[in-house]
Amino acid sequence: MGWAGYGVTGAASIYLIGMTGAGKTTVARSLAAALRYRPVDVDELIEAVAGEPIPAIFAADGEEGFRALETEVLGSVAAFVKCVVATGGGVVVRRENWGALHAGVVVWLDVPVAELAGRVGGDPGRPLVAAAADKPGGVQGVLTDMLTARGDAYAQADVRVRAGGGQTPEEVALAVAEALLTFIADNPPRFGGKDAAAPTAAKGG
């Protein structure tokens, strides 16, 4: 990609949020490579800490147990700089996670539900949608309900990038970088200098 070295956020990390299947992991890798940041996948770290895959964590500890571990891992990640962090789709539901997210810049990858449904199907690696084929409305119905429940929280992101429609991860990453440049130009105090203000946690979630 011809835009390596943008350095769009200085030392601040970039946190990608959005629904399951939004492409956060692949976009994070492309964006990190272009910016020369470190790609970080929160779900992968959770599995490394737990020593077992996410479906097994859900089976043993339920969603609440998984969310507690997710919060712990996210807090550790927030201590690092110059990372592009792919978060789990439900990271926004816990208020305490927003303190960690707003240590950097939060980007919502917004992909249409119909496209998400086509991507994730009944993927057994995604516990909240794995059994959706047997429920009214199928996978798309479950994802629609999920987005309805989380939409206000996603909307608290600093930047919203509409993705999908056949875009490659590289194209989405470029759109993110361009959106970040605009956001940062409009919000310089958050990115260093004597007048910099401390990030504040978003409401709700």
Image (spheres, grey):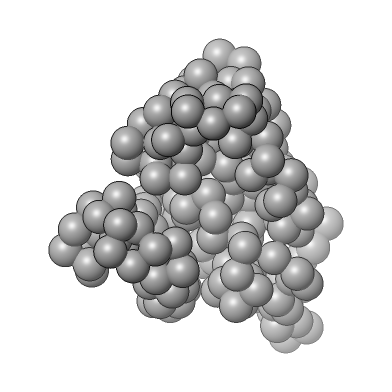
Q: Residue at x 35, y 58 (%)?
A: 58
Q: Quadrant of residue 63?
A: bottom left
Left of 120 or right of it: where is 140? right
Compared with residue 116, is residue 190 higher up or lower down, i.e. above or below? below
| 18 or 65, nearer to the observer | 65
Left of 111 or right of it: where is 76? left
Query: What is the count of numbered marks?
Result: 0
| 90 or 154, nearer to the observer | 90
Compared with residue 96, is residue 134 higher up or lower down, i.e. above or below? above
- Residue 168 percent across, percent down from the top left: 49, 21
- Residue 106 percent across, percent down from the top left: 63, 57
Q: Quadrant of residue 113?
A: top right
Q: Residue at x 54, y 55 (%)?
A: 90
Question: Does the rendering let one see residue 171?
Answer: no
Compared with residue 50, is residue 173 higher up or lower down, i.e. above or below? above
Q: Residue furthest left?
A: 51
Q: Quadrant of the N terminus?
A: top left
Left of 118 or right of it: where is 80? left
| 44 or 83, nearer to the observer | 44
Q: Residue at x 69, y 65 (%)?
A: 205
Compared with residue 106, is residue 173 higher up or lower down, i.e. above or below? above
Q: Residue furthest right?
A: 186
Q: Residue at x 51, y 40 (%)?
A: 20
- Residue 194 percent across, percent down from the top left: 72, 85
Left of 198 or right of it: where is 47? left
- Residue 62 percent across, percent down from the top left: 39, 63
Question: Does the rendering let one see residue 68?
Answer: yes
